[in-house]
Image (cartoon, grey):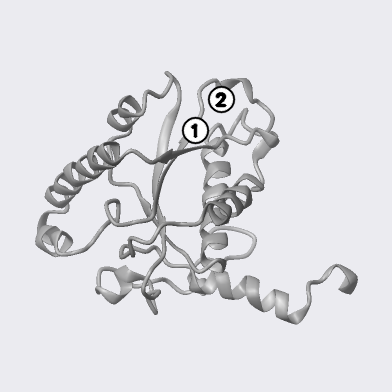
Amino acid sequence: MKQHRFSAEQRAGVYRAIAERRDMRHFLSEPVAADMLTRILQAAHQAGSVGLMQPWRFIRITDNQLRGQIHQLVDNERQLTATALGQRQDEFMRLKVEGVRECGELLVVALPDQREKHIFGRRTLPEMDLASAACAIQNLWLAARAEGLGMGWVSLFDPDTLSALLNMPSGSRPIAILCLGHVAEFYPKPMLELENWAVPQPLSVMVSENGWE
């Protein structure tokens, strides 16, 4: 109903944030203001979650030595990923795949321990904890874009090694390293598209009716 609809300007802002969100790899060293970081994390924390379990934990990395160790961990996996890619190894190694050292804020997103006690909505789909945490990350990404900050989601790491590095409890699991910060500019298209690594698929091939096409 129309009374629930945002104004045209407000709707345009929402759709703009979605359309201009980018997985950023290039950052400026300027720090992120504390109040801005709080707003962005609050937006993430307002994400929907199955059974209201809120299965996200945010670990802010402020120690430079620890940041360096995380960078090394990512670089190790980068080398292993390149080897696994075979013929595309050299092409992959030319890509900038993260901004761990340069970004103003470095966050690790993790699933907490003792998630098995949350049964509502997860009895047949236990992976809904991961899906819920991904919603929080997307909220964070869109809020960052609205604030003029870039964010990059880094998944090149061994989760067990990172978990040990951060003294995480048994049963918890890191799922993302997030690089957050000011950028000189946003990419006009996804970086991997600009680098001719992949081509985004159109919506039409992702939607079917009454069954799998």
**How many residues crowd around disc 2 within 10 Å: few (fewer than 14), some, or many (20 or more)?**
some
Q: How many marks?
A: 2
Residue 1 location in percent, x, y? 88, 70
Residue 144 location in percent, x, y? 52, 61
* Label 2 with label 1: CB-CB less than 8 Å: yes
Q: Depth check: give the residue in front, 130 or 18.
A: 18
Q: Label 2, label 1: how many angstroms apart (C-alpha)?
A: 8 Å
Residue sitting at 62 percent across and 52 percent down?
43
- Residue 28, above or below 119: below
Residue 16 location in percent, x, y? 58, 75
- Residue 74, above or below 97: above
For residue 210, side relative to residue 67 (left or right): right
| Secondary structure under the numbered disc 2 in the rendered image | helix
Residue sitting at 36 percent across and 73 percent down?
184
Give me the disc on residue 202.
Answer: none
| Secondary structure under the numbered disc 1 in the rendered image | strand
For residue 144, side relative to residue 101 (left or right): right
For residue 127, side relative to residue 179 (left or right): right
Q: Depth check: give the residue in front, 34 or 79.
A: 34
Q: Which residue is mark 1?
A: 111
- Residue 116, above or below 131: above
Q: Residue 13 appears in which quarter of the rendering?
A: bottom right
Instruction: Report the amino acid beneath label 2.
Output: Arg
Instruction: Report the amino acid beneath label 1.
Output: Leu
Q: Which residue is mark 2?
A: 115
Residue 158 location in percent, x, y? 28, 35
Q: Depth check: give the residue in front, 173 or 65.
A: 65
**How many residues crowd around disc 1 within 10 Å: few (fewer than 14), some, or many (20 or more)?**
many
